Image (cartoon, rainbow, N blue to C red):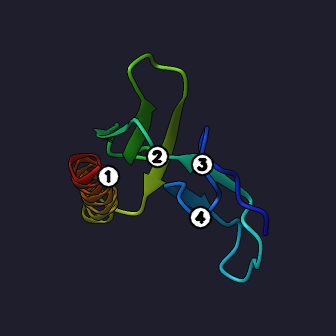
Amino acid sequence: ADMPSEEGGSGNDALLLVMYWYETSVSPSSWVFLKNCVTVPLDRQAEDWNSYCFDCVHLPAVRQTRSFSALSAKHRDEWVSAINKTLSERKEKEIGERAES
């Protein structure tokens, strides 16, 4: 599938959260750029079907927010942790590359 690129970059260097409608889907149904994104865990009412959520909010200005639901607080926390870890590692890499040039 053709993947989008971040402004000024190629599709190979974009940081994306890629979504598929079904486990058997071969092409993504949607994606979210994670550059300048903050991932925020949310808890809703326990009886709601989407009680364990997280939002991906783009900064510095809130241009876009995408909400996602998980099956449990544990799964939600794993998603938030994995995304935040990836974002942190990318930022450290970019800082290192700027320091070398």
Residue under the point 75% across and 77% down: 25
Position in image of residue 53 (x %, y %): 39, 46
Precedes in sequence: disc 2 or disc 3 = 3
Question: Label 4: which residue?
Answer: 12
Q: Which amino acid does the dot numbered 3 rest on?
A: Gly
Query: Are the residues at dot 2 and dot 1 in contact (C-beta closer than 8 Å)?
Result: yes
How crowded pointer 4 is (Cα within 10 Å; few <14, some 14-19, many 20+) is rated as few
Residue 9 marker:
3
Find out whether the residues at labels 4 and 1 contact each other: C-beta distance under 8 Å. Answer: no
The answer to which of marks 2 and 1 sits earlier in the sequence is 2
Furthest residue in direction bottom, as rendered: 24
Secondary structure found at label 4: loop
Kindly identify the amino acid type of the residue bearing the numbered disc 2.
Answer: Leu
* For marks 4 and 2 on the same chain, the one whose residue lies earlier in the sequence: 4
**Disc 2 target residue:** 34
Depth check, mark 2 against mark 3: the one in front is 3
